[in-house]
Image (cartoon, rainbow, N blue to C red):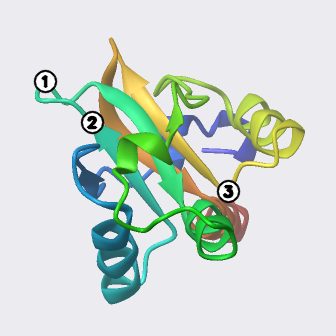
Amino acid sequence: MGISDLRARDLMTSKVITFSENETIAAADIFMMRRGIGSLLIVDDQNNLTGIVTDGDIVRMRNSIQSPDKLVSQLMTRNPITVAPDTPLKKVLKIMLDHDIEHLPVVKERKLVGLITHSRLFKMILKTMEN
C-alpha cells in the first residue's frame, strides 16, 4: 500500500474515549489530564457524535471567567468537522490544515467510529513510507 492509498480508516484509532455533554467542564478537565489525552468526543446515547472538547477549549476556559462547574454542553464545539472512513489521506490532510484541527473524528452514518490525531497521522504516514 502506497502513501496515496491511505484512507481515514487506516489513519484513525477506533479506541476513542467519549464523554457526556451533561458532565461538568471540571470533570472533563480532570478526566483528560488523568488520561493524558487532548480531546474528548461527545456522544449521545446512540453513539452519535454531538461535539468535541479539546485541551485548547479547556485552556481558554481556565483563562476566562467561565465557571468549570458549567456543563460540557456549554463549552463543546457542536457538530465538529468530520470525515468518513473512506476519505483519502490528501483530503484528511487538507481538512486538518485548512481548519487548524488536531483531532478529526471519523463517522459512518452519524455514528462515531474513530479519531485521527496529529501524532497518529504522522506515525501512520511514516510507517507506510518505511514499508
Considering depth in this image, is 87 or 15 the residue closer to the camera? 15
Q: Which mark is residue 127?
A: none
At a point 31% along the width and 50% down the height, the residue shown is 14
Q: Nearer the viewer, mark 3 or mark 2?
A: 2
Real-space CA distance between mark 1 and mark 3, rounded to the nearest whole angstrom: 25 Å
Q: Residue furthest top?
A: 109
Considering depth in this image, is 86 or 109 the residue closer to the camera? 109
Q: Quadrant of the N terminus?
A: top right
At a point 56% along the width and 31% down the height, the residue shown is 80
User: How dense is the environment of label 1, judged by Cα within 10 Å: few (below 14), some, or many (20 and up)?
Assistant: few
* Residue 28 in picture, x, y percent from top left: 34, 67
User: How dense is the environment of label 3, judged by Cα within 10 Å: few (below 14), some, or many (20 and up)?
Assistant: some
Going by the numbered disc 3, the residue's amino acid type is Glu
Say whether residue 101 is visible. Answer: yes
Q: Secondary structure at mark 1?
A: loop
Q: Quadrant of residue 123?
A: bottom right
Real-space CA distance between mark 1 and mark 2, rounded to the nearest whole angstrom: 8 Å
* Residue 76 in picture, x, y percent from top left: 49, 44
Q: Quadrant of the C terminus?
A: bottom right
Q: Residue furthest right?
A: 98
User: Could you tell which of marks 3 and 2 lies nearer the N-terminus?
Assistant: 2
Which residue is the site of mark 3? 102
* Residue 83 in picture, x, y percent from top left: 56, 26
- Residues at discs 1 and 2 in contact (Cβ within 8 Å): yes
Going by the numbered disc 2, the residue's amino acid type is Val
Left of 129 or right of it: where is 72? left
User: Could you tell which of marks 1 and 3 lies nearer the N-terminus?
Assistant: 1
